């Protein structure tokens, strides 16, 4: 006997879930699986919209109890001040514990060297992987989405990393049904991506539906920026602009939040969530294509960084 | 809130998988669905054009859009399942894009395990071939509710109706005999764009939907009142705070059916019975909840319930067993052998188990069975008998994809070895026949 009787076409099914409810339910399921199976999970939290969304989903998943995870921020030293302020306020508000791994400290200690182009995103990998080892985290939640980038489209929801945090795309475990396999040896850990199946538009629609507060840089505002390789970068202590680059004030907003040295702003007059959603729905550029310099370094830039342990 | 947002939010989600062999035009079909639904953005096309030029190719190679790994681009093949996302005003889509090369079975099983619809591609010049039958068999085995037969390259057979009709008839008869509940055949040319997104100007004789139209309108929600309600307990929520000193809730995702406050439920495998006192749907108290909602259930009695237990209506609970008979697809490179000690992961419960018997291995090409193969190797489908160390509340996969499925895992290093589906493998052609054969099914293998 088959019990999956389909509702006849044209009738209203009271049990239909909207796509946002489906995605929310799936993400919550993933958070709870990790809570049930791992000893020391941690959420990577940058203060960007994807990690803010993850935190919101985790809060809902365990309510009315507090979330059973700590947070980890890999601080590149080139963060937007508004985002750091948001990060600290959020941690305080929810009574969370935050670990910070600092790229600047690694540079100051001589353990990492500044790149000639000043970009610090690729430098995050070492502090990240060492923090994972040091705190013996066995599950690390990341806000990666498969729609972001073609290497990420290949990532499992549960992604086993070896003791060096490396990703081997050819040796991934098949992932069937909703049966996530989190088995790992001592020293290994699992990267977990609860919002794998969300698109940029889903994220924004959910943020609007749930009334989630975001750092101001996601909304159009006047900002001192300069143009480098076709992207509007924020002037600042991190090393921009150079002599031949001129600063101007433009009305911009950010689609992603990362290291200031490689995260570009887009021209925009979207000052509300609604305007942002309308803008994204009409955009002919992907979020990363529009605003991330580090992904343009080579055709396989993301895959190569992920292999090394980037999230 | 504006109408734009409301329109975008009111859509439903369809998860589907594509299956096709190497040269039947699957990449072109996927490329066209993404491109014509405007899901490929300018910077992605520019990146593909640049990479193609660097390789000395004259035209942009659209396969580069979907082949995400260095090794895939170098070898020009798709190695692994990739998930793609696109949307129309009517629906959001998650496409499990499964490669068609030699590792087809485990890849298609992976893609089909979460799919509500499978698109099987056929080259109109070749008709139904072994590979097509294999795809249909996997879709039937995984109980994908809807199958679309896309007869591609109609432009190469002069858009001739009899060619399409013959292929559609042969496939439909074969798939129906396997128990595929709904089959839709569509004549297309992915290259020319006929009947993919836009209706074809070359096939007046075809009155059905385009591929996209069908994907947009196929019903994805089911009548849950007909399903056995199942709730695997994932996690126990006990805040023990001043505000919630006595709160004890069982968190989980409803695997099937509907649960209501006041309902009498059994806790399995212990068999204790109590009633549902409350349901919290992610912060909101509700009277009713259904699959696949993630909720927290509170029970009237303070009984022992923990991760791995299953809540089910007291009068409709699954059987409890330590002897699992199932059809499996072996997904690991190392074999599965009789006598092997494994872990079995079923819903939220992982138990020790031993492979007692491998009675047969299935040849998907002709559905013939080979008795007592001794072991299963990568991509094999076969019957296994597994004895578990602890009792499981296991449904037949035919009744519930969620509570009838399991994984076998290597306890030594955690490798996922095998994907399992409990109970009979293919749906019998009619329910009447199934009832008549029910007694016989325990004794003999049904493929």
Image (cartoon, coloured by chain):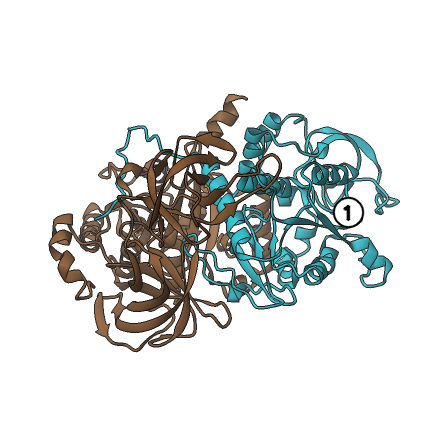
Q: Quadrant of the C terminus of chain B?
A: bottom left
- Residue at the front extreme, as displayed: B302
- Badge 1 marks a residue whose secondary structure is loop
Residue A121 position in % (x across, y down): 72, 52
Residue B153 position in % (x across, y down): 32, 51
Of B248 and B31, the residue lying toward us: B248
Can residue A155 be seen at all in this image of the molecule?
no
Colour of chain A, in one word, is cyan
- Residue at the top extreme, as displayed: B2
Chain appearing in brown on the rendered image: B
Query: Taking B128 as reference, is A89 left or right?
Result: right
Can residue A71 be seen at all in this image of the molecule?
yes
Residue B403 position in % (x across, y down): 35, 52
Query: Taking A115 as reference, is A195 left or right?
Result: left
The residue carrying mark 1 is A261
Name the quadrant containing residue A16.
top left
- Figure check: A267 above or below A262: above
Residue B430 position in % (x across, y down): 15, 49
| Parent chain of label 1 | A
């Amino acid at each position: 006997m088959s019990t999956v009787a389909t509702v006849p076409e044209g009738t209203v099914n009271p049990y239909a879930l909207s796509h946002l409810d489906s995605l929310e339910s799936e993400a919550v399921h993933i958070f709870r699986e990790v809570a049930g199976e791992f000893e020391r999970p941690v959420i990577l939290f940058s203060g960007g919209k994807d990690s803010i969304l993850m935190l919101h989903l985790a809060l809902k998943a365990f309510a009315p109890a507090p979330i059973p995870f700590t947070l980890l921020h890999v601080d590149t030293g080139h963060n937007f001040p508004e985002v750091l302020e948001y990060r600290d306020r959020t941690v305080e508000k929810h009574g969370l514990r935050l670990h910070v791994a600092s790229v600047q400290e690694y540079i100051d200690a001589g353990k990492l060297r500044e790149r000639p182009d000043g970009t610090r995103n690729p430098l995050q990998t070492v502090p990240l992987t060492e923090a994972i080892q040091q705190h013996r985290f066995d599950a690390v939640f990341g806000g990666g989405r498969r729609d972001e980038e073609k290497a990420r489209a290949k990532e499992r929801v549960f992604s086993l990393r070896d003791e060096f945090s490396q990703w081997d795309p050819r040796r991934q475990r098949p992932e069937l049904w909703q049966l996530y396999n989190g088995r790992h040896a001592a020293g290994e850990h699992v990267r977990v991506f609860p919002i794998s199946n969300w698109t940029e538009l889903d994220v924004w629609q959910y943020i609007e539906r749930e009334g989630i507060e975001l750092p101001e840089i996601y909304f159009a505002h006047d900002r001192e920026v300069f143009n480098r390789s076709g992207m509007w970068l924020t002037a600042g202590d991190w090393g921009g602009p150079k002599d031949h680059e001129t600063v101007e004030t433009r009305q911009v907003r950010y689609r992603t939040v990362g290291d200031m040295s490689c995260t570009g702003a887009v021209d925009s007059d979207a000052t509300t969530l609604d305007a942002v959603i309308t803008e994204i729905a009409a955009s002919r550029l992907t979020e990363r294509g529009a605003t991330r310099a580090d992904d343009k370094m080579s055709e396989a830039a993301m895959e190569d960084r992920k292999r090394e342990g980037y999230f | 809130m504006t109408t734009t947002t409301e329109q975008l939010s009111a859509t439903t989600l369809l998860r589907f998988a594509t299956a096709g062999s190497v040269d039947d035009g699957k990449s072109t079909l996927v490329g066209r669905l993404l491109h014509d639904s405007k899901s490929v953005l300018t910077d992605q096309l520019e990146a593909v054009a640049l990479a193609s030029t660097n390789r000395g190719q004259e035209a942009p190679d659209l396969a580069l859009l979907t082949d995400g790994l260095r090794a895939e681009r170098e070898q020009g093949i798709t190695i692994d399942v990739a998930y793609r996302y696109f949307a129309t005003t009517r629906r959001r889509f998650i496409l499990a894009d499964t490669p068609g090369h030699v590792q087809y079975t485990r890849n298609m099983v992976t893609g089909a395990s979460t799919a509500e619809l499978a698109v099987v591609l056929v080259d109109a010049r070749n008709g139904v071939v072994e590979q097509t039958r294999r795809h249909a068999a996997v879709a039937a085995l995984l109980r994908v509710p809807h199958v679309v037969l896309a007869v591609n390259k109609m432009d190469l057979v002069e858009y001739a109706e009899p060619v399409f009709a013959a292929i559609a008839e042969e496939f439909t008869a074969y798939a129906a005999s396997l128990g595929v509940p709904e089959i839709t055949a569509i004549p297309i040319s992915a290259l020319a764009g006929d009947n993919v997104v836009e209706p074809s100007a070359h096939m007046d004789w075809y009155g059905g939907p385009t591929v996209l139209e069908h994907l947009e309108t196929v019903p994805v929600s089911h009548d849950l009142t007909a399903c056995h309600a199942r709730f695997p307990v994932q996690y126990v929520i006990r805040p023990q705070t001043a505000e919630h000193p006595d709160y004890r809730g069982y968190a989980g995702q409803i695997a099937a059916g509907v649960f209501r406050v006041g309902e009498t439920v059994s806790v399995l495998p212990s068999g204790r019975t109590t009633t549902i006192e409350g349901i919290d749907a992610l912060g909101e108290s509700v009277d009713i909840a259904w699959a696949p909602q993630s909720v927290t259930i509170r029970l009237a009695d303070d009984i022992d319930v923990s991760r791995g237990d299953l809540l089910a209506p007291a009068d409709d609970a699954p059987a409890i067993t330590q002897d699992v008979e199932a059809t499996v697809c072996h997904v690991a490179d190392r074999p599965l052998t009789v006598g092997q000690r494994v872990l079995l992961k079923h819903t939220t419960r992982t138990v020790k188990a031993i492979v007692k018997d491998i009675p047969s291995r299935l040849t998907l090409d002709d559905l013939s069975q080979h008795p007592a193969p001794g072991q299963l190797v990568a991509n094999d489908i076969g019957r296994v008998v597994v004895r578990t160390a602890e009792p499981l509340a296991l449904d037949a996969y035919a009744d519930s994809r969620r509570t009838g499925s399991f994984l076998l895992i290597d306890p030594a290093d955690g490798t996922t070895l095998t994907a399992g589906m409990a109970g009979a493998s293919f749906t019998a052609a009619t329910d009447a026949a199934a009832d008549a054969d029910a007694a016989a099914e325990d004794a003999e293998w049904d493929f």
